[in-house]
Amino acid sequence: MNWFEAFILGLVQGLTEFLPISSSAHLRLTAAFAGWEDPGAAFTAITQIGTETAVLIYFRKDIGRIVTAWFRSLTDKAMRSDHDAQMGWLVIVGSIPIGVLGVTLKDQIEGPFRDLRLIATTLIVMGIVLGVADRLAARDEIGGRHRAIRERKTLKDLGVRDGLIYGFCQAMALIPGVSRSGATISGGLLMGYTRESAARYSFLLAIPAVLASGVFELKDATEGGHVSWGPTVFATIVAFGVGYAVIAWFMKFITTKSFMPFVYYRIALGILLFILVGTDTLSPHAGESGD
């Protein structure tokens, strides 16, 4: 990987990590369309450390409260009913599914799951799921002629059951094309949460999983020596800067707008990908690394 490729891939990672369109799919597609080698799961995991650092900084007040309350709850029984302390436990519980499946399916994630036909399928299917979830949220918020406005849940209503469901939704993002934020936000909307609450918890829930994945891949890459460290670190820095700007924009966007633009984009990209692969314009394994 050269420095130009690193810049473009870091830019793509930062732009797509927090939007419900799948950063792993876009990194894979960018390499395929440009004729570059697939950056691979290790590159994706390491550059995600940059975007998750942006999450840590953007949500630093929320995270500070949650971490402080969680640690206090370990010794103070009265704190265990505190919302922030409970959020700490729920993030831990919600991180279990992706941790277990991430280790179990590691070989598939780095191999068969990166087939462009699978990515096209997940882009379309999860796009439809997000669209349905968004429509249900809009119906509750707007009401109708024969339907009253229905109040949606916030993070104060989050319990162990919903936390686990969020966790399993996040685990689906191990398949490129699903999208971590897209899956967890869709799950949240289908469970009756507001758009803002679903997105906020999606970002908070991703922190342990993404950082753990990044450190795990960092260790493997260091021992294996198959990563171009200069370009990869550069891409991670680019992803951090762009990712922070995207978070700030996205959290404002969803307070007044729906997710439908992302739905249309996912479906259109998935169809285009099927056409390109179906006409042999693009190989389903285009850009795959020779590692």
Image (spheres, rainbow, N blue to C red):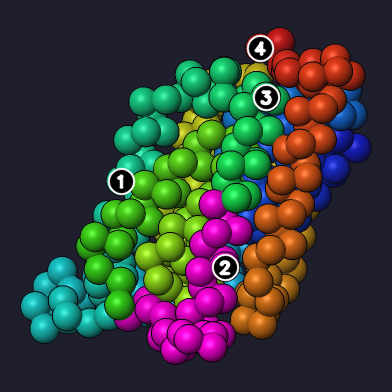
> Could you tell which of marks 3 and 1 lies nearer the N-terminus?
1
Q: What residue type is labelled 2?
A: Arg
Tell me the distance, in whole angstroms, between the alpha carbons under discs 1 and 2.
30 Å
In terms of sequence position, does the residue under pointer 2 or pointer 4 come before the other? 2
Q: Is mark 2 on a helix, strand or loop?
A: helix
In percent of width and height, residue 262 lies at: 71, 58
Cβ atoms at labels 3 and 1 below 8 Å apart: no
For the residues labelled 3 and 1, the Cα–Cα distance comes to: 29 Å
Q: Which label number is shown at residue 117?
A: 3
Judge whether residue 129 can be spotted in this image.
yes
Picture quarter containing residue 144?
Answer: bottom right
Q: What distance separates the C-alpha of mark 3 from that of mark 4?
A: 21 Å
**Residue in the picture at 48% in, 86% down:** 146
For badge 4, the amino acid type reads: Asp
Mark 3: amino acid: Arg
**Separation of disc 1 and disc 4 at Cα?**
29 Å
Q: How crowded is mark 1: few (under 14 residues within 10 Å), some or many (20 or more)?
A: some
Magenta span: 129-156
Badge 1 amino acid:
Ile
Q: Name the residue under label 4.
A: 291
Mark 2 Cα within 10 Å, few/some/many (few <14, many 20+)? Answer: some
Residue at 51% across, 69% down: 136
The residue identified by callout 2 is: 135
Instruction: Name the image quarter holding the C terminus.
Output: top right
Identity of the residue drawn at 46% across and 24% down: 106
Asked whether, in this view, residue 173 is left or right of residue 263, the answer is left
Residue position for label 1: 96
Q: Pick whichever of labels 1 and 2 is earlier in the sequence.
A: 1
Q: Say if the magenta span includes residue 241.
A: no
Disc 2 and disc 3 in contact, CB within 8 angstroms: no
